[in-house]
Amino acid sequence: MLSIIVAIADNYAIGKDNKLLCHLPNDLKRFKKITTGHTIIMGKNTYLSIGKPLPNRRNIVMSLDDEEPVEGIEFVHSFDEVKQYIDDDNENFIIGGASIYKMMFPYTDKLYITQMHKDFEGDTFFPEINPDEWDVIEREEAPEDGINDFKYEYITYKRRKI
């Protein structure tokens, strides 16, 4: 199964200058809990923003360039190559960035959205979630974090079967 995990502002912004829009410590803990032990798929810019392979996960990085080998990272160059790394028996997570989300969105079965109830200035955006194609299967208000001046919630969507 292919899933996306992402924090989205109300205006669908997800990042600016190759950085997250804000620091959400509780969301980062949730991200770690959900993705640990699974394959994660990301673009090169997302990998560079993280700066290292994430531990206890299989790290797949899509890049158009030929990359020098990095321990803990498997580089691929196309969606066809990514398909070879998808574990059919487990959940696989797309973790960013915008072009990877857009490319993989049609093949995704589940969305783990952290919905930030605020508009942010961004330069990267998530595709619009069409309510005719997705069902909300879980919704939970995020705990106050004492850092941010806005509320956010965790919403899990499952793609409707046609």
Image: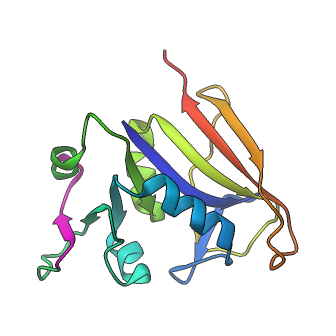
Which residue of the protein is positioned furthest toward the top in this rendering?
Answer: 162
Q: Is 75 within the magenta?
A: yes
> Nearest the camera: 27 or 75?
27
Point out residue 59 in the picture as x, y percentages from the top left corner. Answer: 28, 64
Task: Tell whether 143 sits left or right of 60.
Answer: right
Residue plotted at (56% across, 50% down): 127
Task: Tell whether 107 sits left or right of 114.
Answer: left
- Which quarter of the picture shows residue 156? top right
Region rendered in magenta: 71-80
> Nearest the camera: 71 or 114?
71
Q: Is residue 156 above or below residue 46?
A: above
Task: Tell whether 131 sits left or right of 34.
Answer: right
Q: Is 16 within the magenta?
A: no
Asked if residue 62 can be seen in this view, the reply is yes
Residue plotted at (21% across, 72% down): 72
- Which quarter of the picture shows residue 63? bottom left
Point out residue 31 in the picture as x, y percentages from the top left corner. Answer: 53, 60
